[in-house]
Amino acid sequence: MRTAALTSSLALLAASGVHGKKEFASNIPNGASFEDVEALGHVNSSSGGKLNVFGDAFKHAGLIWNQELCRGDADGDGQTNGEELGDPCCVWKKGDYTTFVKGISNPADANSKVDQEILYQWVCGYPSGNGSHASEVGEADDETLASPKSTPVPSLASRSLVSPVAIVLFAVIASVYV
């Protein structure tokens, strides 16, 4: 009986180590926004285990979201990891809201891509005044700005604590006067 209990305990402990860790989801933009995906960086996205190409890239980045991971294209589908996860301008920091949630795609699945129409709604601006489409991020830094082409919003680079309600209200008012 004692051996069976010990064996069961060890099996549970070993199994818990192969599951995707929920705390990692908060280390990437929209990490917890995928339906039916509990382990985004794993081959078995429902229970973890072996890492997939995005999981390998995330591990290589030190298990944090950074410029290299954002600009990378883990699945080789032509879209950056940032574009696929709703951070096309690579400005997201842990705890921030993402540029978009609806339409995100899996950065480990080359058949899962963000609709180009979503990406073309965003312009990544730079302090020098140069801008590009999200798919042409280039060498942005922490001062990179993200804003929709048609509706002005407060700068994401300011990192001010503007509530989502204030942002929506600002966008509605701005669209009335544009």
Image (cartoon, rainbow, N blue to C red):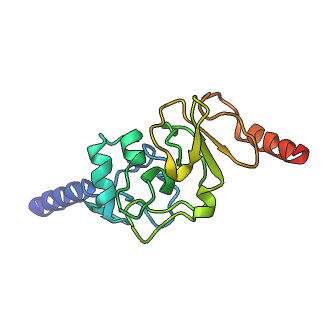
Identify the residue at horizontal 40%, vertical 64% (top origin): 77
Q: Position of residue 26 (x, y in %)?
A: 45, 44
Residue found at the very far right of the displayed protein: 177
Tally the marks.
0
Name the residue located 84 percent from the left edge and 47 percent from the top edge: 175
Is 151 in front, or is 159?
A: 151
Where 3 falls versus 141 (above or below)? Answer: below
In the rendered image, which quarter contains the N terminus? bottom left
Q: Residue at x 22, y 54 (%)?
A: 13
The location of residue 33, given as percent across then percent down, is 53, 56
Question: Is 171 on the left-hand or right-hand side of 76?
Answer: right
Counting from the top left corner in percent of width and height, residue 134 is at 55, 50
Q: In which image quadrant can residue 16 be found?
A: bottom left
Q: Look at 47% across and 52% down and name the residue there.
A: 31
State whether residue 141 appears in this view: yes
Is residue 119 left or right of 139 when viewed as pictured? right
Which one is in front, 68 or 38? 68
Q: Compared to 60, does 18 lie above or below?
A: below
Examine the rendered structure and indicate whether residue 162 appears above or below residue 168: above
